[in-house]
Amino acid sequence: MSCFGIPVDASGSPAIGIDLHRRHGYYSHMKSVNIADLKNRLSQYLSEVKAGKEIVIRDRKLPIARIVPIHRNAKQDDELLALAAEGKIRLAETTLDESFWKLPAPRVSAKSLKRAVDLERDGR
């Protein structure tokens, strides 16, 4: 068998002794750890993330997730960061294009708006 012209064995691994997952591809420039190592050294890896590094988590050799730092700029306040940490909001990765502001505003009736505000204030 072969994959992209590279011979592979029955398990799908390269038959020529090259670990393609570690040396090539999108994740090759990031630190990559397996789940067990992440569990054993979580504090160390989180310190690296705080320092600005991205870490790819692998399940065996398959990348399944990334831990990335939250980039803070002068416009973001602590309340937004706290909401992001709680998973209630997701911080923007880019700024809005100027064309966004030229879109027509959504039409909401005063009755619907009042009901939404009342529900929010009542905690329902």
Image (tube, rainbow, N blue to C red):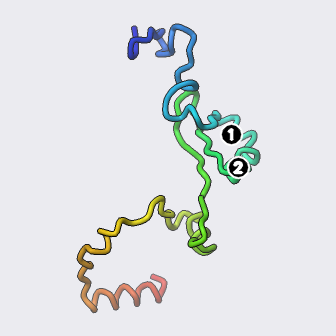
Residue tagged by mark 2?
46
Quadrant containing the N terminus in the rendered view: top left
- The answer to which of marks 1 and 2 sits earlier in the sequence is 1
Alpha carbons under labels 1 and 2: distance apart: 9 Å
Give the foreground label among 1 and 2: 2
Please indicate whether residue 109 sits to the left or right of residue 5 in the image: left
Judged from the image, the secondary structure of the residue bearing numbered disc 1 is: helix
Residue 114 in picture, x, y percent from top left: 34, 91
Q: Name which residue type carries label 2.
A: Leu
Q: Residues within 10 Å of mark 1 (few under 14, many from 20)?
A: some
What is the quadrant of residue 66 in the picture?
top right
Please indicate whether residue 74 sits to the left or right of residue 7 in the image: right
> Residue at horizontal 58%, vertical 28%?
60
Q: Is residue 109 above or below residue 85?
A: below
> Residue at horizontal 59%, vertical 50%?
68
> Residue at horizontal 58%, vertical 39%?
56
Residue in the foreground of this view, choosing between 121 and 57: 57
Residue 115 in picture, x, y percent from top left: 34, 88
Q: Is residue 34 above or below residue 49?
A: above
Q: Name which residue type carries label 1.
A: Leu
Q: Which mark is residue 84?
A: none
Residue in the foreground of this view, choosing between 52 and 14: 52
Residue 46 in picture, x, y percent from top left: 70, 49
Judged from the image, the secondary structure of the residue bearing numbered disc 2 is: helix
Q: Is residue 73 above or below residue 113?
A: above
Q: Which mark is residue 38?
A: 1
Q: Is residue 49 above or below residue 40?
A: below
Q: Residues within 10 Å of mark 2 (few under 14, many from 20)?
A: some
What is the quadrant of residue 111 in the picture?
bottom left
> Residue at horizontal 52%, vertical 38%?
64
Residue 100 in picture, x, y percent from top left: 31, 69
Quadrant containing the C terminus in the rendered view: bottom left
